[in-house]
Image: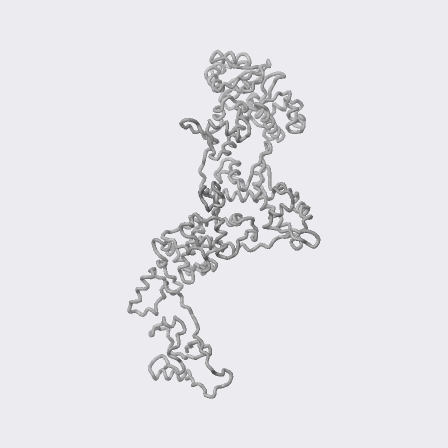
Amino acid sequence: MTALCRCSGNATIQAIRFTECVLGHILSKQIWLCLNFSFPDCYAAKFSPLQVGIEMLEDGVPLEHLITCVPSITIVTAQNGFKVIKWIQNKPPAQNSEPWIQRCKSPVGNPQLIQFSREIIDLLKSQPSCLLPISKFIPSYHHHFAKQCRVSDYGFSKLLDLLEAVPHVLQIIGMGTKRLLTLTHRAQVKRFTQDLLKLLKFQASKQVAIRDFMQAYHWCFSRDWRVTDYGICDLMDLLAEIPDTTITITHQTTDMVISVPKRERTVEEMERTKQFGKEVVDLLRHQPHCRMPFSKFIPTYHHHFGRQCKLSYYGFTKLMELLEAIPDILMVLECGEEKVLILTEVERIKALAAQLVKLLRAQKNFSLSVSQLLPEYNKTFGYGLRLQDYDAASLPALLAKLCHVVKVVDGSDSREVQLINRKSLRLLTTQLLALLMSQENHQVTKGMKVEELSQHYLNVHGTQLNPCEYGFLSLSELLKSLPYLVELYFEESDENCEDCSTGGGHGVEWVRLTKLYQFARNVRALLHTYHYNQIFLTEFQGAYRKFTGCSFEPRFYGCVAIDELLSAIPQVVWIKGHGHKRIIVLKNDMKAKPSYSMPNSPQPRENAESLRDSPISSTTSGSQSPGCDADSELLRLTSPVDLLCGPVPSCLPSPQLHPDPVLLQQMDLIDFEKTPPPQLPTELESVEEAAAYGTSDPPEQPGRRDDSPPLCDEKNMLSMDSPGRRASRSRFKLAANFSFTTGL
């Protein structure tokens, strides 16, 4: 006979109180209570009569199962065949303890019994109130799994022995022919915990109030909430069984709120999680159809990478939480009790694109007939290409999704699949960096919308940016391939925003420079203020501090020294030279170009100091650069010292060299002239004549015009007493009218 207790709201709590008050005294004296005879009488004497029924009640749970939910209590079968309640001392069981004490242990080391226990859970979950008569087990098993339950396959001769071999998940209640099968309290709590976590993650706020629990449960699982399905009469009793590290219950004014405990992860752990996502992609790409069972992930990860997957390294305590932290890369599918890991559709398309590139490169002329594509794919990779995995109804529809990798053309005999010629990503990377670095200061941290970046590229370069030409489906995927240069993030758009093309309430994708390349942007702007766009490495830190108004620490960017930090931005600068003469040089691609229609070059200290406060480049003056501004340099012009011999102020533009204009004269340049031109003095005569005049310069030579323009601006820079003037010179007038000086 199986007694079922009606759901009275506090039945379990009353049973616990009864255990403390009555059973604690009686059972401590090793007096046993018969389940169906003594226990109802004792309970009625202490509290009130139990509402029990002989048949299965829709809103009740078996009394035998309910008693086993009480801590320190168990039910065993006596020698006379009756089931009795016994007290379990709060002590570790002895080695030769009775078998019923070991009922919570799982069959470790027996994979057949482990699989059978999973099938038991799956089968009983589909039954009303998780109850199944033992006489209906065989037909129900056959109907549910479409296979026979052969007891001999598990090493047993009787069905009862097989069912008793999995006491950690299966409880047999009642006696005789009316015995019932149900899940143990431990299995029910584990099942409820999994369902509750799924329900909480289904909510946008990751929390749910007790008064809204029934409605949230119905929305999540598409069935009504019945607490008796989990072998308990009250929801709070189930919540009390779940540890505090799994869920958090907050008592508010009018209600209680169930939520997932939040642990703030560090920036390093988030970056490691992103790297873990790349490892998962690499791991699943080597699996057939980019999927694998959840149970094989840990050993496969260890075998593939040669190291253990430590969850604490990423800030998690459960593997499922870590896998759910990369939803844009991985999906977890539930196939019965077995969970399957599979890449998202975007990642599967990427993996298939890489496979087709490998396949077509091995073919002649990098092409293959469309009819031979599927057989060659099966031959190369060892498994067939399933169109349903990529949500494609036909092979042409699948190839249309791979338009950035392959193209279908008309061949000599039939349609052929060919690889497309990709453009180099190096030049595009430099162009995108230049566009993002040309933003205003207040826009650098936020960045710009991905659509705006494409429009700016069109305005600057005059051509539309087509990601398919570089092997990507979209500009977002292209930018994701540059994680060390830029980063993408979503921002909720305003519903009243008129220029939002995505519509109100949807996330807008933005792109911005990483922290490292925000530093590279300041370095680029600093070098733009120097002649030849270069500076000594020893002067860089002081110049950067003066230019930006703040100092920097290489350790903030993961580097040890300044030279290591600058070497981490090879797209912007490079270091040449050795020792203390090393020079930081701006890459040619990063130099300012007048064709850019973007905002002006970044000036981090526009409000504090102007660009004139930047130090003078020592490479221009040939000596150590004085740290003064352009105004103080211009004030030096009133000094009695000849400034033409000093360094050129940094605010002055570089001199432009132009040849003297050629005056066309009516003369025959082929025939000799009748009147020979005046003969120029020889070098020796020039020296003697100079000595006669008592000066180091020879006299003015005939044929030189006084109004002829100088050779370049540098000649005007030289003083009359400058040591740079040669002791003696001889000037020649060339046909092109160039002024040309030669010293002895």
Q: Which residue is painted at 45% across and 51% down in the image?
A: 517
In the rendered image, residue 143, in percent from the top left (x then y), is placed at 65, 27
**694 left or right of 118?**
left
| Residue 278 in view | yes
Vertical order, 126 against 604 (above or below): above
- The residue under the point 47% across, 16% down is 18
Quadrant position of the C terminus in the picture: bottom left
Dividing the picture into quadrants, the one containing residue 278 is top right
The residue positioned farthest toward the right in the image shown? 413
Asked whether, in this view, residue 522 is left or right of residue 322, the answer is left
Q: Where is residue 249 in the image (x, y as percent from the top left)?
A: 45, 29
Q: Which colour scheme appears in the figure?
A: one colour
Q: In which quarter of the image is the N terminus?
A: top right
Question: Residue 716's quadrant in the figure?
Answer: bottom left
Q: Is residue 295 shown to the viewer in this render?
A: no
Residue 189 against residue 538 in the figure, above or below: above
Residue found at the far bottom of this picture? 674
Q: Which of 412 and 157 is in front in this view?
A: 412
Q: How many marks?
A: 0
Image coordinates of residue 58 in percent, x first then y, are 56, 20
Task: Give the x, y percent position of residue 365.
Answer: 66, 55
In the image, 339 versus 6, the foreground residue is: 6
Looking at this view, is 275 or 507 the one in front? 507
